[in-house]
Image (spheres, rainbow, N blue to C red):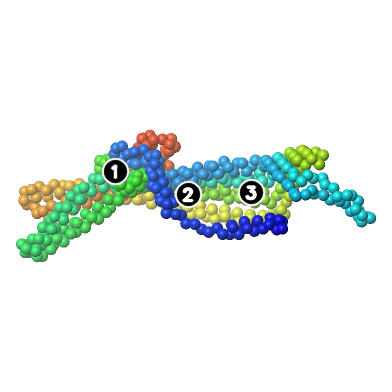
Amino acid sequence: MNVLKLAGLPLLALVAGCAVKPEPLTVSQIAKTADRNFALVDAEQEPVTGPIDLYEAMARALKYNLDYKVEMMNNALKVRELDLSRYDMLPQLVANGGYAGRSNFSGASSLSLLSRRQSLEPSTSSERNVFTGDLTLSWDVLDFGLSYVRAKQRADEVMIAEEQRRKVSSRIIEDVRTSYWRAVSAERLLTKLQTLENSVSTTLTNSERLAERRLSAPLTALTYQRELVDIQAQVRRLQRELVIAKAQLAALMNLKPGTQFSLVLPDRDSALPPIRQSGEEMMMAALHNRSELREVSYRQRINAKELDAALLRALPSFRGIVGANVDSNSFLFNQDWIQWGARASWNVLNVFRYPAQKKAVRAQDDLLQQRELALTMAVITQVHVARARYAHLTAELETAAHQMSVQGKIMNQIQAGYRAGAMSQQTELREEMNTLVAEVKYDIAYADAQNAYANLYSSMGVDSYGADLTGRENVQTMSASLASLWNARMSASVPK
């Protein structure tokens, strides 16, 4: 009966395991997680103490942007996995301990195979309670070879993670440059746009009152109101373009929404550097530096090592063993001893599987080579497009600058005429609107040109920060390094 009870214990454990049900998070658990994440999202960041310039914005993005931190943590994880894989190449050193007990002695007798008579009284050679232990060192040559191949693949995965980090950093720098210059435009113009909208709203209300009192011709009043509504619509479109730029920049720098900060407002006459490299030089630089192409090359190396692993699995395995043993059984003549041995084994079916594995590895290699060619065409096309885009946007910037200059002169004439009573308020409002539109168009053109300039280096795969930065420096140090790097690039004839 006791035996049946003991046998039923595993069944009870199995039934209890099957009774596990999914449990959703409680409201308090969700609230606790939300509070913790909200507190940690911008923890341990240097506070903003003054106006932020372009290079401080870039530094803060590289140091605190959470998307970039994810890539850095992924890189660190791959390094830890590589360190862990090195232990797989070591021999196994296994310590075992055990206890065995029974309710009575283990005994036996012998039966003669010739006379079929019992030749020995029942006897035992084991105690009822026995403790055993051993320490065994074993090493499999085949496992060592496979572990070495896997470790080499892990090392290549570390390099792939590094290339992915480089790609994310370039994208973040591009986004920062675009958002920064749009945010600069917003700080310059949003107050003016709000003032203009208030003036337009007041004038529109006055015009509607005059029309209701029939103090002006209906068609003239409606035409005037139509122009005012058009101006109001343009103002709001411009506000929509600019108002989110600062929020986007704050997100890139990992500042919480609503954090107050100001920007350094550079002069509008900042010149953009010309392209000093030929298209072929830039394309070759891209083929040497682009992270996507390097990633494919590392994956090709990983795939080539997979062929080595398949070959190793097809070989016989040889394992050597040496160990120390101890047994508490007092009936043993030797209760402790050293043992050694060797064992060879061979899964013969792996020999027949190897040709199929080889074909699969070759097919993967063909796929990677084709992907590499496709990426090569995409990369050189991106370089060509980046060059053309930068040239086009530079020309657009020159046009926008000329337009803003002409509009400024027109505005001076209109204001002088309005003060002299020769120009109407309608004309002045229209030209104020045109002046602000010209300024916004110039700022947006400048932001796009700055983004295109950063995209030139991104298309060539050139790092967006210098090798002297590790990410552990403070914001001021990182900002100075970035300023030095990008200012040097503006005067360099070869991308660095």
Residue 334, percent across and down? 80, 38
Q: Residue at x 63, y 54 (%)?
A: 358
Residue 333 location in percent, x, y?
A: 82, 39
Reading the image, the residue beneath label 3 is: 308
The Cα atoms of the two marked residues, 2 and 3, are separated by 25 Å
Image position, residue 450 (x, y; %): 33, 45
Q: Quadrant of residue 335?
A: top right
Give above or below for 264 relative to 241.
above
Secondary structure beneath label 3: helix
Q: Amino acid at mark 2?
A: Glu
For the residue pair 237 and 412, the one nearer the viewer reads as 237
Which disc number belongs to residue 292?
2
Work out whether residue 483 or residue 33 is closer to the camera in this orientation and state it: 33
Query: Is residue 354 shown to the viewer in this render?
Result: yes
Spatial CA span between label 3 and label 1: 58 Å
Callout 1 amino acid:
Gln
Residue 188 left/right relative to 290? left
Q: Which residue is mark 1?
A: 260
